[in-house]
Protein backbone atom coordinates (compact mmCIF):
# COMPACT_ATOMS: atom_id res chain seq x y z
CA UNK A 1 0.00 0.00 0.00
CA UNK A 2 2.81 2.41 0.82
CA UNK A 3 4.29 1.97 -2.66
CA UNK A 4 1.20 3.58 -4.20
CA UNK A 5 1.48 6.93 -2.45
CA UNK A 6 0.94 8.57 0.92
CA UNK A 7 -1.88 7.23 3.06
CA UNK A 8 -4.06 9.79 4.83
CA UNK A 9 -5.73 6.92 6.68
CA UNK A 10 -2.35 5.87 8.05
CA UNK A 11 -1.81 9.39 9.41
CA UNK A 12 -5.29 9.39 10.91
CA UNK A 13 -4.71 6.09 12.71
CA UNK A 14 -1.34 7.30 14.00
CA UNK A 15 -3.16 10.41 15.21
CA UNK A 16 -5.38 8.17 17.34
CA UNK A 17 -2.31 7.07 19.27
CA UNK A 18 -1.81 3.69 17.65
CA UNK A 19 1.89 2.65 17.72
CA UNK A 20 3.65 2.90 14.38
CA UNK A 21 4.69 -0.76 14.33
CA UNK A 22 1.05 -1.77 14.72
CA UNK A 23 0.07 0.52 11.84
CA UNK A 24 2.87 -0.86 9.66
CA UNK A 25 1.73 -4.43 10.33
CA UNK A 26 -1.90 -3.52 9.56
CA UNK A 27 -0.83 -2.03 6.21
CA UNK A 28 1.00 -5.24 5.33
CA UNK A 29 -2.00 -7.34 6.36
CA UNK A 30 -4.50 -5.14 4.51
CA UNK A 31 -6.42 -4.43 7.74
CA UNK A 32 -5.63 -0.74 8.20
CA UNK A 33 -9.28 0.23 7.61
CA UNK A 34 -10.44 -2.16 10.34
CA UNK A 35 -7.75 -0.84 12.69
CA UNK A 36 -9.11 2.66 12.09
CA UNK A 37 -12.64 1.55 12.97
CA UNK A 38 -11.42 -0.21 16.13
CA UNK A 39 -9.56 2.80 17.52
CA UNK A 40 -12.02 5.45 16.36
CA UNK A 41 -14.57 3.81 18.68
CA UNK A 42 -12.15 3.74 21.64
CA UNK A 43 -12.82 7.17 23.14
CA UNK A 44 -11.23 6.29 26.49
CA UNK A 45 -8.09 4.50 27.57
CA UNK A 46 -8.60 1.50 29.88
CA UNK A 47 -7.28 2.45 33.32
CA UNK A 48 -8.51 -0.15 35.80
CA UNK A 49 -8.18 -3.86 36.41
CA UNK A 50 -10.84 -6.06 37.98
CA UNK A 51 -9.82 -5.47 41.60
CA UNK A 52 -9.69 -1.69 41.13
CA UNK A 53 -13.14 -1.63 39.54
CA UNK A 54 -14.47 -3.77 42.38
CA UNK A 55 -13.10 -1.29 44.91
CA UNK A 56 -14.51 1.74 43.06
CA UNK A 57 -17.95 0.30 42.26
CA UNK A 58 -18.51 -1.79 45.37
CA UNK A 59 -19.25 -4.85 43.26
CA UNK A 60 -17.89 -8.19 44.42
CA UNK A 61 -15.24 -9.46 41.93
CA UNK A 62 -17.17 -12.69 41.34
CA UNK A 63 -20.35 -10.77 40.56
CA UNK A 64 -18.36 -8.36 38.41
CA UNK A 65 -16.91 -11.22 36.33
CA UNK A 66 -20.40 -12.69 35.86
CA UNK A 67 -21.76 -9.35 34.66
CA UNK A 68 -18.81 -8.82 32.29
CA UNK A 69 -19.19 -12.33 30.82
CA UNK A 70 -22.94 -11.80 30.41
CA UNK A 71 -22.20 -8.74 28.28
CA UNK A 72 -20.11 -11.00 26.03
CA UNK A 73 -16.57 -10.11 27.14
CA UNK A 74 -13.91 -12.56 28.37
CA UNK A 75 -12.72 -12.61 31.97
CA UNK A 76 -9.89 -10.08 32.44
CA UNK A 77 -6.59 -11.57 33.51
CA UNK A 78 -5.15 -10.57 36.90
CA UNK A 79 -3.79 -7.06 36.67
CA UNK A 80 -5.09 -6.54 33.13
CA UNK A 81 -6.45 -3.01 32.68
CA UNK A 82 -9.54 -3.35 30.49
CA UNK A 83 -12.05 -1.08 32.24
CA UNK A 84 -12.61 2.61 31.53
CA UNK A 85 -14.24 5.30 33.66
CA UNK A 86 -17.45 4.84 31.69
CA UNK A 87 -17.39 1.09 32.37
CA UNK A 88 -17.03 1.76 36.11
CA UNK A 89 -19.87 4.29 36.04
CA UNK A 90 -22.16 1.93 34.13
CA UNK A 91 -21.48 -1.03 36.42
CA UNK A 92 -21.90 1.12 39.52
CA UNK A 93 -25.29 2.41 38.32
CA UNK A 94 -26.49 -1.14 37.69
CA UNK A 95 -25.34 -2.17 41.15
CA UNK A 96 -27.31 0.68 42.73
CA UNK A 97 -30.51 -0.66 41.21
CA UNK A 98 -29.69 -4.17 42.41
CA UNK A 99 -28.88 -2.99 45.96
CA UNK A 100 -32.10 -0.95 46.15
CA UNK A 101 -34.18 -3.97 45.16
CA UNK A 102 -35.42 -2.30 41.96
CA UNK A 103 -33.57 -4.88 39.87
CA UNK A 104 -32.98 -8.52 40.78
CA UNK A 105 -29.44 -9.80 40.26
CA UNK A 106 -30.55 -12.73 38.10
CA UNK A 107 -32.66 -10.43 35.93
CA UNK A 108 -29.70 -8.06 35.55
CA UNK A 109 -27.54 -10.92 34.27
CA UNK A 110 -30.30 -12.09 31.93
CA UNK A 111 -30.75 -8.62 30.44
CA UNK A 112 -26.97 -8.23 30.17
CA UNK A 113 -26.81 -11.41 28.07
CA UNK A 114 -29.56 -10.17 25.75
CA UNK A 115 -27.99 -6.72 25.38
CA UNK A 116 -24.50 -8.11 24.87
CA UNK A 117 -25.62 -10.66 22.28
CA UNK A 118 -27.75 -8.16 20.34
CA UNK A 119 -25.14 -5.40 20.29
CA UNK A 120 -22.41 -7.86 19.36
CA UNK A 121 -24.42 -8.81 16.28
CA UNK A 122 -25.03 -5.15 15.40
CA UNK A 123 -21.34 -4.32 15.78
CA UNK A 124 -20.29 -7.32 13.69
CA UNK A 125 -22.78 -6.39 10.97
CA UNK A 126 -21.42 -2.82 10.83
CA UNK A 127 -17.85 -4.05 10.52
CA UNK A 128 -18.95 -6.51 7.81
CA UNK A 129 -20.61 -3.67 5.92
CA UNK A 130 -17.54 -1.43 6.16
CA UNK A 131 -15.21 -4.25 5.11
CA UNK A 132 -17.49 -5.18 2.23
CA UNK A 133 -17.60 -1.58 1.00
CA UNK A 134 -13.81 -1.33 0.98
CA UNK A 135 -13.44 -4.72 -0.72
CA UNK A 136 -15.97 -3.72 -3.37
CA UNK A 137 -14.03 -0.54 -4.14
CA UNK A 138 -10.83 -2.53 -4.49
CA UNK A 139 -12.44 -5.07 -6.81
CA UNK A 140 -13.64 -2.22 -8.99
CA UNK A 141 -10.02 -1.14 -9.39
CA UNK A 142 -10.21 1.89 -7.12
CA UNK A 143 -7.01 3.42 -5.86
CA UNK A 144 -5.76 2.97 -2.32
CA UNK A 145 -6.91 6.48 -1.45
CA UNK A 146 -10.42 5.81 -2.76
CA UNK A 147 -10.66 2.50 -0.87
CA UNK A 148 -9.51 4.18 2.33
CA UNK A 149 -11.98 7.01 1.72
CA UNK A 150 -14.73 4.39 1.68
CA UNK A 151 -13.55 3.19 5.08
CA UNK A 152 -13.54 6.73 6.46
CA UNK A 153 -17.04 7.36 5.09
CA UNK A 154 -18.27 4.15 6.69
CA UNK A 155 -16.68 5.13 10.00
CA UNK A 156 -18.33 8.58 9.84
CA UNK A 157 -21.73 6.89 10.11
CA UNK A 158 -20.84 5.02 13.31
CA UNK A 159 -21.36 7.94 15.77
CA UNK A 160 -24.95 8.14 14.50
CA UNK A 161 -25.68 4.56 15.52
CA UNK A 162 -26.36 5.16 19.26
CA UNK A 163 -29.14 7.64 18.39
CA UNK A 164 -30.61 5.25 15.83
CA UNK A 165 -30.47 2.30 18.22
CA UNK A 166 -32.09 4.28 21.03
CA UNK A 167 -35.01 5.41 18.85
CA UNK A 168 -35.54 1.97 17.30
CA UNK A 169 -35.29 0.39 20.76
CA UNK A 170 -37.99 2.72 22.10
CA UNK A 171 -40.35 1.89 19.26
CA UNK A 172 -39.73 -1.86 19.55
CA UNK A 173 -40.25 -1.65 23.33
CA UNK A 174 -43.65 -0.06 22.79
CA UNK A 175 -44.56 -2.62 20.11
CA UNK A 176 -43.54 -5.53 22.36
CA UNK A 177 -45.62 -4.16 25.23
CA UNK A 178 -48.61 -3.73 22.89
CA UNK A 179 -48.31 -7.37 21.73
CA UNK A 180 -48.35 -8.58 25.31
CA UNK A 181 -51.39 -6.41 26.07
CA UNK A 182 -53.26 -7.88 23.12
CA UNK A 183 -52.42 -11.43 24.21
CA UNK A 184 -53.26 -10.75 27.85
CA UNK A 185 -56.72 -9.40 26.93
CA UNK A 186 -57.45 -12.01 24.25
CA UNK A 187 -59.48 -15.16 24.73
CA UNK A 188 -57.92 -17.98 26.71
CA UNK A 189 -57.51 -20.00 23.52
CA UNK A 190 -55.50 -17.29 21.73
CA UNK A 191 -52.68 -18.94 19.78
CA UNK A 192 -49.38 -17.67 18.47
CA UNK A 193 -48.35 -18.83 15.01
CA UNK A 194 -44.75 -20.09 14.70
CA UNK A 195 -43.10 -20.79 11.36
CA UNK A 196 -39.80 -21.77 9.78
CA UNK A 197 -38.61 -21.12 6.21
CA UNK A 198 -35.68 -23.32 5.16
CA UNK A 199 -33.62 -22.41 2.09
CA UNK A 200 -33.28 -25.47 -0.16
CA UNK A 201 -29.81 -26.42 -1.41
CA UNK A 202 -27.92 -23.95 0.75
CA UNK A 203 -25.34 -26.52 1.88
CA UNK A 204 -24.38 -27.20 -1.73
CA UNK A 205 -24.12 -23.46 -2.40
CA UNK A 206 -21.71 -22.98 0.49
CA UNK A 207 -19.34 -25.42 -1.22
CA UNK A 208 -19.69 -23.99 -4.72
CA UNK A 209 -19.95 -20.19 -4.34
CA UNK A 210 -17.07 -17.86 -3.46
CA UNK A 211 -17.41 -15.98 -0.19
CA UNK A 212 -18.65 -12.68 -1.62
CA UNK A 213 -21.39 -14.36 -3.67
CA UNK A 214 -22.40 -16.51 -0.71
CA UNK A 215 -22.64 -13.34 1.38
CA UNK A 216 -24.94 -11.85 -1.25
CA UNK A 217 -27.18 -14.95 -1.13
CA UNK A 218 -27.37 -14.84 2.66
CA UNK A 219 -28.03 -11.10 2.62
CA UNK A 220 -30.82 -11.42 0.08
CA UNK A 221 -32.36 -14.34 1.97
CA UNK A 222 -32.41 -12.33 5.21
CA UNK A 223 -33.64 -9.15 3.50
CA UNK A 224 -36.69 -10.86 2.01
CA UNK A 225 -37.51 -12.58 5.31
CA UNK A 226 -37.33 -9.39 7.39
CA UNK A 227 -39.17 -7.25 4.79
CA UNK A 228 -42.08 -9.65 4.40
CA UNK A 229 -42.35 -10.38 8.13
CA UNK A 230 -42.55 -6.65 8.90
CA UNK A 231 -44.97 -5.99 6.05
CA UNK A 232 -47.38 -8.63 7.38
CA UNK A 233 -47.06 -7.53 11.00
CA UNK A 234 -45.07 -10.60 11.99
CA UNK A 235 -41.67 -10.82 13.63
CA UNK A 236 -38.45 -12.57 12.66
CA UNK A 237 -37.32 -14.29 15.85
CA UNK A 238 -33.90 -15.32 14.54
CA UNK A 239 -31.90 -16.53 11.59
CA UNK A 240 -30.50 -20.04 11.97
CA UNK A 241 -28.00 -20.37 9.12
CA UNK A 242 -30.13 -21.09 6.05
CA UNK A 243 -33.38 -20.98 8.03
CA UNK A 244 -35.54 -18.15 9.35
CA UNK A 245 -37.85 -18.51 12.35
CA UNK A 246 -40.82 -16.14 12.54
CA UNK A 247 -43.97 -15.59 14.59
CA UNK A 248 -47.34 -13.92 14.11
CA UNK A 249 -49.99 -13.07 16.66
CA UNK A 250 -52.77 -14.70 14.68
CA UNK A 251 -53.07 -17.69 12.37
CA UNK A 252 -54.48 -15.82 9.34
CA UNK A 253 -51.55 -13.40 9.27
CA UNK A 254 -49.14 -16.29 9.70
CA UNK A 255 -50.66 -18.22 6.80
CA UNK A 256 -50.52 -15.19 4.48
CA UNK A 257 -46.91 -14.48 5.49
CA UNK A 258 -45.89 -18.11 4.89
CA UNK A 259 -47.46 -18.18 1.43
CA UNK A 260 -45.88 -14.84 0.56
CA UNK A 261 -42.46 -16.11 1.64
CA UNK A 262 -42.78 -19.27 -0.45
CA UNK A 263 -43.95 -17.34 -3.52
CA UNK A 264 -41.31 -14.60 -3.23
CA UNK A 265 -38.40 -16.99 -2.86
CA UNK A 266 -39.75 -19.15 -5.69
CA UNK A 267 -39.85 -16.16 -8.07
CA UNK A 268 -36.42 -14.82 -7.08
CA UNK A 269 -33.93 -15.85 -9.75
CA UNK A 270 -31.00 -15.54 -7.36
CA UNK A 271 -32.38 -17.83 -4.66
CA UNK A 272 -33.70 -21.37 -4.51
CA UNK A 273 -37.10 -22.33 -3.10
CA UNK A 274 -37.84 -22.54 0.59
CA UNK A 275 -39.66 -25.14 2.61
CA UNK A 276 -42.12 -23.49 4.99
CA UNK A 277 -43.64 -25.23 8.01
CA UNK A 278 -46.03 -23.75 10.57
CA UNK A 279 -47.83 -24.63 13.78
CA UNK A 280 -49.92 -22.66 16.26
CA UNK A 281 -50.58 -22.75 19.98
CA UNK A 282 -49.31 -21.46 23.32
CA UNK A 283 -45.61 -20.57 23.50
CA UNK A 284 -43.09 -19.29 26.03
CA UNK A 285 -41.33 -16.05 25.06
CA UNK A 286 -38.03 -15.32 26.76
CA UNK A 287 -35.27 -12.87 25.83
CA UNK A 288 -36.83 -12.32 22.42
CA UNK A 289 -36.83 -16.05 21.61
CA UNK A 290 -39.76 -18.46 21.55
CA UNK A 291 -39.91 -21.92 23.14
CA UNK A 292 -42.35 -24.78 23.56
CA UNK A 293 -43.87 -27.81 21.88
CA UNK A 294 -45.40 -25.62 19.14
CA UNK A 295 -41.91 -24.48 18.10
CA UNK A 296 -40.68 -28.08 17.93
CA UNK A 297 -43.72 -29.11 15.89
CA UNK A 298 -43.26 -26.24 13.39
CA UNK A 299 -39.59 -27.17 12.96
CA UNK A 300 -40.36 -30.85 12.37
CA UNK A 301 -43.18 -30.02 9.95
CA UNK A 302 -40.76 -27.91 7.90
CA UNK A 303 -38.57 -30.97 7.34
CA UNK A 304 -41.53 -32.78 5.78
CA UNK A 305 -42.38 -29.96 3.33
CA UNK A 306 -41.17 -30.10 -0.26
CA UNK A 307 -39.47 -27.13 -2.00
CA UNK A 308 -41.76 -24.18 -2.64
CA UNK A 309 -44.56 -25.50 -0.43
CA UNK A 310 -46.20 -24.44 2.82
CA UNK A 311 -47.11 -27.25 5.23
CA UNK A 312 -49.12 -26.67 8.41
CA UNK A 313 -50.08 -28.58 11.54
CA UNK A 314 -53.55 -29.80 12.51
CA UNK A 315 -54.11 -26.77 14.77
CA UNK A 316 -53.37 -24.45 11.86
CA UNK A 317 -55.71 -26.46 9.64
CA UNK A 318 -58.53 -26.24 12.19
CA UNK A 319 -58.10 -22.47 12.46
CA UNK A 320 -57.98 -21.90 8.68
CA UNK A 321 -60.61 -24.46 7.67
CA UNK A 322 -63.65 -22.71 6.25
CA UNK A 323 -61.77 -19.56 5.25
CA UNK A 324 -62.43 -19.12 1.51
CA UNK A 325 -59.02 -17.51 1.00
CA UNK A 326 -57.17 -20.77 1.60
CA UNK A 327 -57.12 -24.29 0.21
CA UNK A 328 -55.86 -27.09 2.46
CA UNK A 329 -54.98 -30.55 1.25
CA UNK A 330 -54.24 -33.50 3.48
CA UNK A 331 -50.76 -35.01 3.24
CA UNK A 332 -51.81 -37.84 5.54
CA UNK A 333 -50.09 -38.55 8.83
CA UNK A 334 -46.32 -38.37 9.10
CA UNK A 335 -44.04 -39.64 11.82
CA UNK A 336 -42.09 -36.69 13.25
CA UNK A 337 -38.99 -37.23 15.36
CA UNK A 338 -39.58 -36.88 19.12
CA UNK A 339 -43.24 -36.06 18.47
CA UNK A 340 -44.86 -39.12 16.90
CA UNK A 341 -47.35 -39.58 14.08
CA UNK A 342 -49.36 -36.43 13.36
CA UNK A 343 -51.59 -35.26 10.49
CA UNK A 344 -50.20 -32.46 8.31
CA UNK A 345 -51.68 -30.31 5.56
CA UNK A 346 -50.41 -28.50 2.47
CA UNK A 347 -51.60 -24.90 2.22
CA UNK A 348 -52.09 -22.59 -0.75
CA UNK A 349 -54.21 -19.60 -1.69
CA UNK A 350 -57.60 -20.21 -3.28
CA UNK A 351 -57.51 -19.47 -7.00
CA UNK A 352 -53.78 -20.12 -7.24
CA UNK A 353 -53.41 -22.07 -10.47
CA UNK A 354 -49.89 -23.16 -9.60
CA UNK A 355 -49.69 -26.86 -8.85
CA UNK A 356 -46.25 -26.46 -7.31
CA UNK A 357 -47.27 -26.84 -3.66
CA UNK A 358 -49.25 -30.02 -4.36
CA UNK A 359 -47.04 -31.51 -7.06
CA UNK A 360 -45.47 -34.07 -4.72
CA UNK A 361 -47.03 -34.98 -1.45
CA UNK A 362 -44.12 -36.72 0.24
CA UNK A 363 -40.80 -35.37 1.35
CA UNK A 364 -38.98 -38.48 0.13
CA UNK A 365 -40.35 -37.98 -3.35
CA UNK A 366 -39.59 -34.26 -3.37
CA UNK A 367 -35.94 -35.07 -2.77
CA UNK A 368 -35.76 -36.73 -6.18
CA UNK A 369 -35.81 -34.91 -9.50
CA UNK A 370 -39.14 -35.53 -11.18
CA UNK A 371 -39.89 -35.48 -14.91
CA UNK A 372 -43.42 -34.16 -15.30
CA UNK A 373 -44.80 -33.27 -18.70
CA UNK A 374 -45.92 -29.98 -17.20
CA UNK A 375 -42.27 -28.92 -17.38
CA UNK A 376 -40.49 -31.06 -19.97
CA UNK A 377 -43.10 -31.59 -22.67
CA UNK A 378 -44.80 -28.21 -22.84
CA UNK A 379 -42.02 -26.52 -24.89
CA UNK A 380 -41.92 -29.54 -27.23
CA UNK A 381 -45.62 -29.40 -28.01
CA UNK A 382 -45.58 -25.61 -28.28
CA UNK A 383 -42.90 -26.04 -30.96
CA UNK A 384 -44.90 -28.77 -32.73
CA UNK A 385 -48.02 -26.58 -32.76
CA UNK A 386 -45.98 -23.73 -34.23
CA UNK A 387 -44.40 -25.90 -36.94
CA UNK A 388 -47.52 -27.98 -37.69
CA UNK A 389 -50.48 -25.71 -36.83
CA UNK A 390 -53.54 -27.58 -35.63
CA UNK A 391 -51.66 -30.81 -34.94
CA UNK A 392 -51.78 -30.39 -31.15
CA UNK A 393 -54.97 -28.42 -30.65
CA UNK A 394 -56.37 -28.28 -27.15
CA UNK A 395 -53.83 -30.82 -25.92
CA UNK A 396 -51.31 -28.03 -25.37
CA UNK A 397 -53.61 -26.43 -22.83
CA UNK A 398 -54.03 -29.78 -21.10
CA UNK A 399 -50.29 -30.21 -20.74
CA UNK A 400 -50.01 -27.06 -18.66
CA UNK A 401 -52.95 -27.77 -16.37
CA UNK A 402 -53.79 -31.45 -16.14
CA UNK A 403 -50.25 -32.76 -16.49
CA UNK A 404 -49.99 -34.86 -19.69
CA UNK A 405 -51.81 -35.80 -22.90
CA UNK A 406 -53.25 -39.28 -23.19
CA UNK A 407 -51.68 -42.09 -25.22
CA UNK A 408 -54.31 -41.60 -27.92
CA UNK A 409 -53.57 -37.87 -28.09
CA UNK A 410 -49.84 -38.54 -28.37
CA UNK A 411 -50.53 -40.98 -31.19
CA UNK A 412 -52.69 -38.40 -32.97
CA UNK A 413 -49.96 -35.76 -32.63
CA UNK A 414 -47.34 -38.17 -33.97
CA UNK A 415 -49.53 -39.00 -37.00
CA UNK A 416 -50.06 -35.27 -37.66
CA UNK A 417 -46.30 -34.75 -37.66
CA UNK A 418 -45.82 -37.72 -40.00
CA UNK A 419 -48.39 -36.35 -42.44
CA UNK A 420 -47.03 -32.81 -42.33
CA UNK A 421 -45.05 -31.48 -45.28
CA UNK A 422 -41.87 -30.62 -43.37
CA UNK A 423 -38.20 -31.41 -43.59
CA UNK A 424 -37.55 -35.10 -42.86
CA UNK A 425 -34.79 -34.39 -40.36
CA UNK A 426 -37.08 -32.00 -38.48
CA UNK A 427 -39.84 -34.58 -38.65
CA UNK A 428 -37.58 -37.22 -37.07
CA UNK A 429 -36.49 -34.75 -34.40
CA UNK A 430 -40.08 -33.88 -33.47
CA UNK A 431 -41.13 -37.53 -33.35
CA UNK A 432 -38.13 -38.27 -31.14
CA UNK A 433 -39.14 -35.43 -28.83
CA UNK A 434 -42.68 -36.80 -28.61
CA UNK A 435 -41.39 -40.27 -27.82
CA UNK A 436 -38.97 -38.86 -25.26
CA UNK A 437 -41.78 -36.95 -23.54
CA UNK A 438 -43.96 -40.06 -23.52
CA UNK A 439 -41.15 -42.17 -22.11
CA UNK A 440 -40.33 -39.58 -19.45
CA UNK A 441 -43.95 -39.54 -18.39
CA UNK A 442 -43.93 -43.34 -18.12
CA UNK A 443 -40.76 -43.20 -16.07
CA UNK A 444 -42.30 -40.63 -13.76
CA UNK A 445 -45.45 -42.73 -13.37
CA UNK A 446 -43.34 -45.78 -12.61
CA UNK A 447 -41.22 -43.81 -10.15
CA UNK A 448 -44.32 -42.49 -8.43
CA UNK A 449 -45.83 -45.98 -8.30
CA UNK A 450 -42.64 -47.35 -6.76
CA UNK A 451 -42.49 -44.42 -4.35
CA UNK A 452 -46.05 -45.13 -3.26
CA UNK A 453 -45.20 -48.80 -2.80
CA UNK A 454 -42.14 -47.80 -0.83
CA UNK A 455 -44.27 -45.48 1.29
CA UNK A 456 -46.80 -48.21 1.94
CA UNK A 457 -44.03 -50.66 2.78
CA UNK A 458 -42.44 -48.12 5.12
CA UNK A 459 -45.79 -47.43 6.76
CA UNK A 460 -46.37 -51.16 7.24
CA UNK A 461 -42.93 -51.47 8.78
CA UNK A 462 -43.63 -48.51 11.05
CA UNK A 463 -47.00 -50.01 12.02
CA UNK A 464 -45.37 -53.39 12.69
CA UNK A 465 -42.63 -51.70 14.71
CA UNK A 466 -45.23 -49.78 16.69
CA UNK A 467 -47.28 -52.93 17.28
CA UNK A 468 -44.16 -54.83 18.33
CA UNK A 469 -43.18 -51.97 20.63
CA UNK A 470 -46.65 -51.91 22.17
CA UNK A 471 -46.48 -55.69 22.67
CA UNK A 472 -43.09 -55.41 24.32
CA UNK A 473 -44.31 -52.57 26.50
CA UNK A 474 -47.30 -54.68 27.54
CA UNK A 475 -44.99 -57.61 28.27
CA UNK A 476 -42.68 -55.40 30.29
CA UNK A 477 -45.64 -53.91 32.15
CA UNK A 478 -47.07 -57.39 32.84
CA UNK A 479 -43.70 -58.64 34.05
CA UNK A 480 -43.32 -55.53 36.19
CA UNK A 481 -46.79 -56.04 37.69
CA UNK A 482 -45.98 -59.71 38.39
CA UNK A 483 -42.72 -58.77 40.08
CA UNK A 484 -44.45 -56.10 42.12
CA UNK A 485 -47.14 -58.58 43.20
CA UNK A 486 -44.48 -61.17 44.10
CA UNK A 487 -42.53 -58.57 46.03
CA UNK A 488 -45.65 -57.45 47.91
CA UNK A 489 -46.60 -61.07 48.63
CA UNK A 490 -43.10 -61.86 49.89
CA UNK A 491 -43.10 -58.72 52.00
CA UNK A 492 -46.51 -59.62 53.43
CA UNK A 493 -45.32 -63.13 54.30
CA UNK A 494 -42.18 -61.79 55.87
CA UNK A 495 -44.17 -59.26 57.83
CA UNK A 496 -46.57 -61.97 59.01
CA UNK A 497 -43.67 -64.20 60.11
CA UNK A 498 -42.07 -61.29 61.90
CA UNK A 499 -45.34 -60.55 63.71
CA UNK A 500 -45.75 -64.19 64.68
CA UNK A 501 -42.16 -64.37 65.93
CA UNK A 502 -42.69 -61.22 67.92
CA UNK A 503 -45.96 -62.55 69.43
CA UNK A 504 -44.23 -65.82 70.31
CA UNK A 505 -41.32 -64.07 71.93
CA UNK A 506 -43.67 -61.79 73.87
CA UNK A 507 -45.64 -64.84 75.06
CA UNK A 508 -42.40 -66.53 76.11
CA UNK A 509 -41.28 -63.44 77.95
CA UNK A 510 -44.65 -63.14 79.67
CA UNK A 511 -44.60 -66.86 80.60
CA UNK A 512 -41.07 -66.61 81.94
CA UNK A 513 -42.00 -63.52 83.87
CA UNK A 514 -45.03 -65.27 85.37
CA UNK A 515 -42.92 -68.26 86.39
CA UNK A 516 -40.35 -66.05 87.98
CA UNK A 517 -43.08 -64.09 89.73
CA UNK A 518 -44.63 -67.31 91.15
CA UNK A 519 -41.22 -68.54 92.25
CA UNK A 520 -40.53 -65.22 93.87
CA UNK A 521 -43.84 -65.38 95.69
CA UNK A 522 -43.07 -68.90 96.95
CA UNK A 523 -39.61 -67.89 98.06
CA UNK A 524 -41.01 -64.86 99.80
CA UNK A 525 -43.67 -66.99 101.56
CA UNK A 526 -41.09 -69.54 102.71
CA UNK A 527 -38.79 -66.79 103.88
CA UNK A 528 -41.67 -65.16 105.73
CA UNK A 529 -42.59 -68.46 107.39
CA UNK A 530 -39.01 -69.02 108.49
CA UNK A 531 -38.81 -65.59 109.95
CA UNK A 532 -42.17 -66.00 111.71
CA UNK A 533 -41.07 -69.41 113.10
CA UNK A 534 -37.82 -68.01 114.40
CA UNK A 535 -39.62 -65.15 116.10
CA UNK A 536 -42.14 -67.55 117.65
CA UNK A 537 -39.42 -69.82 118.94
CA UNK A 538 -37.59 -66.87 120.31
CA UNK A 539 -40.64 -65.70 122.23
CA UNK A 540 -41.15 -69.21 123.55
CA UNK A 541 -37.65 -69.32 124.93
CA UNK A 542 -38.12 -65.94 126.56
CA UNK A 543 -41.34 -67.14 128.26
CA UNK A 544 -39.56 -70.27 129.63
CA UNK A 545 -36.84 -68.24 131.18
CA UNK A 546 -39.36 -66.20 133.12
Image (tube, rainbow, N blue to C red):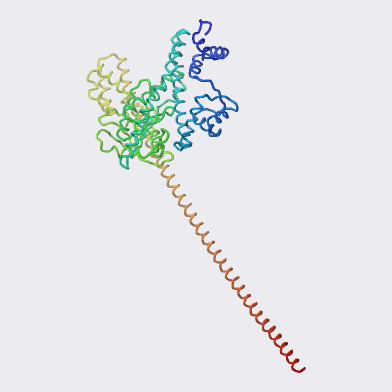
| Residue sitting farthest toward the front | 546
Viewer-proximal residue, 494 or 467?
494
Find residue 382 and report its horizontal and vertical position in percent: 27, 20
> Is 418 on the left or on the right of 458, as rendered?
left
> Is 236 on the left or on the right of 499, as rendered?
left
Viewer-proximal residue, 501 or 231?
231
| Residue sitting farthest toward the right | 545
Above-or-below relation of 186 to 50: below
Find residue 375 and report its horizontal and vertical position in percent: 32, 24
Image-quadrant location for residue 238: top left
How many numbered marks have been drawn onto this rendered protein structure? 0
Viewer-proximal residue, 137 or 51?
51
Find residue 47 and report its horizontal and vertical position in percent: 55, 23
Find residue 213 and report its horizontal and vertical position in percent: 43, 18
Q: Quadrant of the C terminus?
A: bottom right
Image-quadrant location for residue 518: bottom right
Identity of the residue drawn at 49% across and 27% down: 89
Above-or-below relation of 431 to 524: above
Above-or-below relation of 42 to 66: above
Viewer-proximal residue, 6 or 495?
6
Image-quadrant location for residue 277: top left
Amino acid sequence: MTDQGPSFLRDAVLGLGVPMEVVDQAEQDGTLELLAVEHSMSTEEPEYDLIEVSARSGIDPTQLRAMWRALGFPDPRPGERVFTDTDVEMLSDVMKFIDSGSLEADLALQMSRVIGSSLNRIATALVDAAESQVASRRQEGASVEDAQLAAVQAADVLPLMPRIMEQVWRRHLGAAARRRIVRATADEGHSVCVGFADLVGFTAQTQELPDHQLAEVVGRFETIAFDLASAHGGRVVKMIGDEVMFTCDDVITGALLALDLAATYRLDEHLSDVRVGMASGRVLERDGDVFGSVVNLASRVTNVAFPGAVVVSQDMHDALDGDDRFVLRSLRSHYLKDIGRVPIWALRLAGDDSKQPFQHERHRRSARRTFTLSYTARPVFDEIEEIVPGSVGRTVEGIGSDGAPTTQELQAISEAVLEADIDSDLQVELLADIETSRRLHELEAEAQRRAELADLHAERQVAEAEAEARLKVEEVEAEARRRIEDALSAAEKKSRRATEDADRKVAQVEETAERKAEAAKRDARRKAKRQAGKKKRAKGRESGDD
